């Protein structure tokens, strides 16, 4: 009888631990080395997958006027660690409209985190994210509008990168004008690195033309995403738009991790959004529960061993 009771206790503890492992919150993460496979993504408006230079890329806008496209995770993500995340993506903006003043690219694209839906977006100078509320966006703006910082009337000047909130395209929370040596619409691959630490509320943005993660921060701003989004899950993705002038605006690859862990490397394979990534690990609190559970199992097994030896001795 002693053996049977101990066996039941051990089995029950094993079931508890198994349940904790099965129901533990898994970190949201996905990787797209290209977009031949778009599982887990909702593609909207003028956005489509096209083969450009032998690579399947997400084209947000074709090189035509008044276009607007977006791509978001189909499922809303529960970013439980105070909305912390790290993302890395490569984009390419080119095939600009040829005018009497030379090529003019417009309007730009944005990385957007929002709670509204997986199909939002618009055309024109809002870069597709205008009016999405609540949201936070990092825009890569290729066209100089009057509402842009340091507007000087030169449409090919004032390429800038900025952190924006709640779809307000005029209020630049923090921005950096890109040097004339780096035209965002110059047809070259540019890699962006965006990291948000929910513990410090600090968002950092970096970019490079060689795919390497810069040591220094190009743009940093303190913003409380937990306060902005409450407890709502979020959709993450991209918007892009054109107006009278245009560009082909594409996403070449994309990595996303639902906690703060800056990403340096290009993705080497595709793990679609919404899938269970291999090797996903439980949250730290779950690890503590599991360790405590294993300790309980070990203690029970030791008691069981002593009881068995005592029975044999008798």
Image (spheres, grey):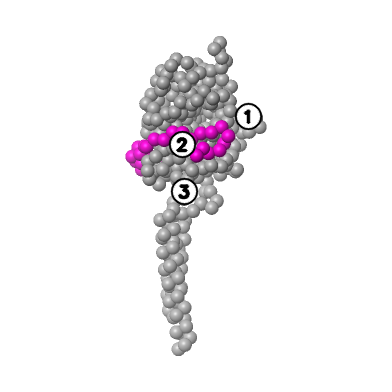
Q: Residues within 10 Å of mark 3 (few under 14, many from 20)?
A: many
Q: Which residues are magenta?
A: 206-233
The residue where tag 1 is placed is: 52
Task: Please report the residue visible at 58 percent of the width from the left and 25 percent of the height from the top.
Answer: 187
Quarter where residue 153 is shown: top left
Residue visible at 45% across and 45% down in the picture: 260
Q: Are marks 3 and 2 in contact (CB under 8 Å)?
A: no
Q: Position of residue 264 (x, y in %)?
A: 53, 42
Estimate the spatial distance between the alpha carbons at disc 3 and disc 2, rounded to whole Å: 25 Å
Does the magenta run of residues contain 211?
yes
SS at mark 3 in the image: loop
**Label 2 to label 1: alpha-carbon separation:** 31 Å
Which numbered tag is attached to residue 27? 3
Mark closest to the chain's N terminus, 3 or 2:
3
Q: Does residue 105 appear left or right of residue 291 in this picture?
A: right
Foreground of the two, 190 or 108? 190
Q: Residue at x 46, y 19 (%)?
A: 144
- Position of residue 89 in the picture relative to residue 82 (left or right): right
Q: Nearer the viewer, residue 307 or 263?
A: 263
Q: Is residue 219 magenta?
A: yes
- Residue hosting label 2: 217
Q: Residue 29 at x, y = what percent?
A: 50, 45
Quadrant placement of the C terminus: bottom left
- Residue 174 in the image: state x and y as whole percent: 40, 30
Question: As rendered, which of 247 and 21 lies closer to the eye?
Answer: 247
């Amino acid at each position: 009888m002693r053996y049977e009771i101990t066996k039941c206790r051990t089995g029950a503890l094993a079931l508890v631990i198994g349940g904790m492992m099965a129901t533990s919150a898994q970190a949201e993460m996905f990787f797209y080395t290209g977009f031949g496979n778009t599982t887990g993504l909702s593609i909207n408006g003028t956005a489509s997958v096209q083969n450009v230079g032998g690579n399947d890329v997400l084209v947000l806008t074709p090189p035509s006027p008044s276009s607007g496209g977006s791509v978001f995770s189909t499922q809303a993500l529960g970013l439980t660690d105070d909305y912390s995340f790290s993302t890395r993506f490569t984009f390419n903006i080119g095939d600009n409209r040829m005018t009497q003043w030379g090529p003019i690219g417009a309007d730009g694209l944005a990385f957007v985190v929002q709670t509204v839906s997986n199909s939002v977006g618009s055309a024109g100078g809002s870069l597709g994210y205008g009016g999405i509320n609540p949201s936070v966006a990092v825009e890569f703006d290729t066209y100089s509008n009057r509402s842009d910082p340091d507007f000087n009337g030169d449409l090919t000047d004032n390429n800038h990168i900025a952190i924006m909130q709640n779809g307000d395209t005029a209020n630049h929370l923090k921005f950096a004008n890109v040097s004339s040596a780096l035209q965002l619409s110059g047809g070259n691959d540019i890699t962006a690195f965006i990291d948000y630490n929910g513990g410090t509320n600090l968002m950092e943005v970096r970019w490079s033309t060689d795919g390497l993660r810069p040591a220094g921060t190009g743009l940093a701003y303190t913003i409380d995403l937990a306060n902005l989004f409450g407890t709502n899950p979020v959709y993450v993705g991209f918007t892009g738009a054109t107006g009278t002038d245009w560009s082909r605006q594409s996403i070449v690859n994309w990595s996303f991790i639902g906690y703060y862990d800056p990403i340096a490397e290009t993705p080497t394979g595709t793990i679609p959004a919404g899938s269970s990534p291999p090797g996903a690990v439980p949250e730290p609190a779950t690890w503590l529960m599991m360790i405590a559970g294993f300790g309980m199992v070990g203690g029970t097994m030791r008691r069981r061993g002593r009881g068995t030896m005592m029975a044999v001795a008798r």
